[in-house]
Image: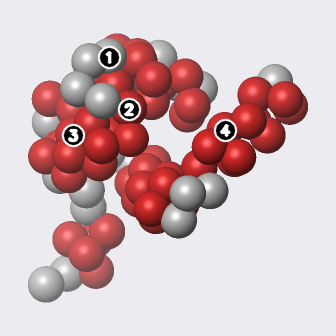
Amino acid sequence: MSESADRDMPAEELHRICTQLYGTVRWQTALSRELRVNDRTVRRWASGDTAIPHPVALCVRLMAFLDELSWLGEWRQLMEDEA
């Protein structure tokens, strides 16, 4: 397997992780706000029309990891306080 294939995030993985984090309704909008990108961009990633950039894949996987550790709520609050 190539190095780039190891880093790729399929749209299905993005969908699975984000529905766990945000729920099944409007998760694209929630993710776009956290990443500070246009929600259409997230929808293109989710549909598979556009490849998910490696930094975004890392960020989404990190958010899932932190959520599992119950740190994401605190992190989100810090981000909101900074905004």
Cα separation, mark 3 vs mark 4, equals 20 Å
Residue 76: horizontal and vertical position, in percent?
66, 38
Sequence-earlier tag: 2 or 4: 2
Q: Which mark is residue 26?
A: 1
Q: Nearer the viewer, residue 60 or 9?
A: 60
Sequence-earlier tag: 3 or 1: 3
Amino acid type at circle 4 is Arg
Q: Which mark is residue 9?
A: none
Q: Is there any visible trace of residue 44 in the rendered image?
A: no
Q: Is there any visible trace of residue 76 in the rendered image?
A: yes
Residue furthest out toward the front = 70
- The quadrant of the image that shows the N terminus is bottom left
Q: Which residue position is annotated with label 4?
A: 76
Cα separation, mark 3 vs mark 2, equals 10 Å
Amino acid type at circle 1 is Arg
Q: Which mark is residue 15?
A: 3
Residue furthest out toward the right = 82
Quarter of the rendering containing residue 77: top right
Tell which tag, 3 or 2, sits nearer the viewer. Answer: 2
Residue at the spot x=62%, y=56% of the render?
71
Q: Label 3's element?
A: helix
Do the residues bearing badges 1 and 2 touch, measured as CB atoms within 8 Å? Answer: yes
Residue 28: horizontal and vertical position, in percent?
34, 23
Sequence-earlier tag: 3 or 2: 3
Q: What colour scheme governs how the chains and residues are painted in the rendered image of this protein?
A: secondary structure
